[in-house]
Amino acid sequence: MYQELLDHIKKYVQLAPREEQQFCEKLKFKKLKKKEFLLEPGKLCKGNYFILKGCIRQYLINKKLNEQIIHFGIEHWWIADQDSLLNNQPSACYIQALEETDLLLIHEKDRISLAKEVPPLETYFRIMMQKSFVASQRRIGFIFNQTEEERYRFFSKLYPGFVQRVPQYMLASYLGFTPQFLSRLRAKKDL
């Protein structure tokens, strides 16, 4: 089960066999049932989770009591509440499995100590954080600069299988429009 993560890491940095073993010894396997929560508001996020199998959403409840999806995670993506981790404060968000999901957890204290002991892991996690930040920047840019239809078309082309895995109202929340708009958009024959 660790090999998937090690293969992912090898795309970015090289670890010696001893370093791979040292890293794997710190990982904890976690299995979630569909709709099970990994994190809820008021609780501390334990660390970063690598998704081996499944689909997860991270969301907030806004002042109008609507769910606002801020992040999705699928196979070979990382998910965590970075605000909770960095500031050691209770989370304001939910992280929930949309499907049966298998994860590998690296506790934050272990990630920090490993980053000092195994410099390539520091590089790997920095790259993962940068990639996540770029994705967030792009999403904000798309919301400000593209029409709803352009956002949907772009996202559908970028992640065609993902669009089929996520309920329509969640996809609409993530892309910044109403489920009704998405229904009308998907009903068009040219999509």
Image: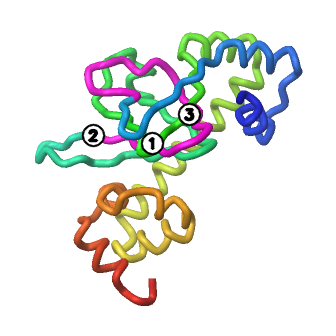
- Judged from the image, the secondary structure of the residue bearing numbered disc 1 is strand
Mark 2 Cα within 10 Å, few/some/many (few <14, many 20+)? some
* Residue at which label 2 appears: 60
Region rendered in magenta? 38-59
Amino acid tagged 2: Leu
Rendered image: mark on residue 56? 1
Sequence-first tag of 1 and 3: 1
Q: CA distance from mark 2 to mark 1?
A: 14 Å
Image quarter for residue 50?
Answer: top right
Residue at x-position 71% and y-position 33%: 5
Q: CA distance from mark 3 to mark 2?
A: 23 Å
Q: Is residue 85 above or below residue 57?
A: above
Task: Compare residues 30 and 116 and report the one nearer the observer.
Answer: 30
Amino acid tagged 3: Asp
Sequence-first tag of 3 and 2: 2
Q: Position of residue 110 (x, y in %)?
A: 60, 12
Residue 45 lies in the magenta-colored region = yes
Amino acid tagged 1: Ile
Task: Compare residues 118 and 156 and report the one nearer the observer.
Answer: 156
Rendered image: mark on residue 102? 3
Q: Position of residue 154 (x, y in %)?
A: 50, 71
- Which of the two marks, 2 or 1, is nearer to us in this view? 1
